[in-house]
Image (spheres, rainbow, N blue to C red):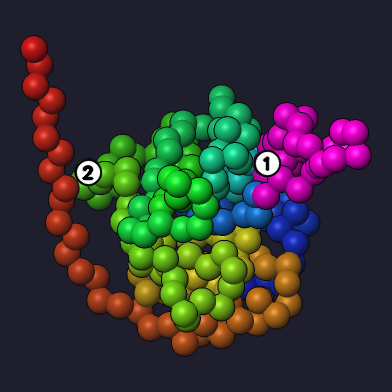
């Protein structure tokens, strides 16, 4: 089992990676759309903003597809605005499905406040339908990180483990942040490689992964889905 985190911009590091060298990519990229166009001296959003982030994700998805094996897959965190853009970038290259992370509590906002986050699941033609013979629901329940948060976009290790359990042995996170994906990989006994452009977060990720301990493999019960009643 090997874990590495490099203080690099993934846009420069990904092209240097060998093709078909990674079993899965699990990552939470920056997906905010910062562009604001001027309209009568007032800020206004524009659908053209989406083309900017779509261009970036098309480049990323091309590299993600290249470095993953023929049986590989990827999980990409996103939100309601960036999901259509990422879907368009992946469409025609890979099969896709949308997963829901149920946080079990509401956040800030208006009357109907968001209590979920989206995860884009992409896979290649050779990816097995059931990696371990287990059928899983597409709604994943896990509490968000609490007071122990060390990164503004930090994801719970237990949530990441729910994704990683269906992945192969070599995992890449091009936006490693505080290293939560790497921690989950070490606990599951998987090899991990990460890229993080911020030197402080890179050092933090290395430290967290180094302190993590491999966990014994536990039996994961199969989720039996009810058969639809045909009328």
Task: Name the quarter where the C terminus is drawn.
Answer: top left
The image shows a total of numbered marks equal to 2
| Residue 190 seen anywhere in this rendered image of the structure | no
Q: Is residue 119 magenta?
A: no
Residue 118 higher or lower than 13, as above or below: above
Q: Helix, strand or loop at disc 1? A: helix
Mark drawn on residue 135: 2
Q: Residue furthest right?
A: 41
| Residue 1 coordinates in the image, percent (x, y) | 44, 74
| Residue 201 seen anywhere in this rendered image of the structure | yes
Q: Residue at x 71, y 58 (%)?
A: 10
Residue 49 higher or lower than 216, as above or below: above
Q: Left or right: 187 with respect to 195?
A: left
| Residue 72 coordinates in the image, percent (x, y) | 46, 45
Q: Helix, strand or loop at disc 2? A: loop
Mark drawn on residue 90: none
| Residue 159 coordinates in the image, percent (x, y) | 38, 61
Residue bearing mark 1: 57
- Please rate how many residues cluster around mark 1, counting C-alpha atoms within 10 Å: few if below 14, some from 14 to 19, many from 20: many
- Please rate how many residues cluster around mark 2, counting C-alpha atoms within 10 Å: few if below 14, some from 14 to 19, many from 20: some
Q: Left or right: 46 with respect to 182?
A: right
> Which one is earlier in the sequence, the residue at label 2 or at label 1?
1
Residue range corresponding to the magenta coloring: 32-60
Q: Left or right: 113 with respect to 11?
A: left
Q: Residue at x 66, y 76 (%)?
A: 202
Residue 219 higher or lower than 64, as above or below: below
Q: Residue at x 16, y 48 (%)?
A: 223
| Residue 184 coordinates in the image, percent (x, y) | 42, 70
């Amino acid at each position: 089992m090997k874990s590495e985190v490099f203080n690099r911009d993934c846009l420069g590091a990904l092209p240097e990676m060998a093709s078909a060298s990674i079993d899965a990519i699990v990552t939470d990229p920056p997906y905010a759309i910062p562009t604001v166009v001027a309209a009568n001296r007032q800020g206004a959003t524009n659908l053209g903003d989406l083309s900017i982030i779509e261009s970036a994700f098309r480049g990323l998805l091309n590299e993600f597809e290249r470095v993953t094996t023929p049986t590989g897959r990827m999980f990409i965190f996103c939100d309601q605005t960036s999901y259509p853009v990422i879907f368009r970038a992946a469409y025609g290259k890979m099969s896709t499905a949308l997963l829901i992370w149920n946080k079990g509590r509401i956040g800030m906002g208006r009357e109907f406040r968001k209590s979920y986050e989206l995860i884009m699941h992409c896979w290649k033609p050779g990816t097995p339908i059931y990696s371990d013979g287990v059928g899983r629901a597409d709604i994943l329940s896990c509490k968000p990180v609490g007071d122990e948060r060390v990164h503004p976009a930090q994801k719970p290790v237990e949530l990441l483990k729910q994704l990683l359990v269906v992945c192969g042995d070599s995992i890449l996170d091009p936006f490693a942040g505080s290293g939560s994906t790497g921690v989950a990989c070490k606990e599951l006994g998987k090899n991990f490689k990460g890229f993080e452009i911020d030197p402080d977060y890179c050092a933090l990720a290395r430290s967290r992964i180094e302190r993590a301990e491999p966990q014994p493999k536990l039996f994961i019960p199969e989720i039996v889905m009810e058969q639809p009643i045909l009328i």
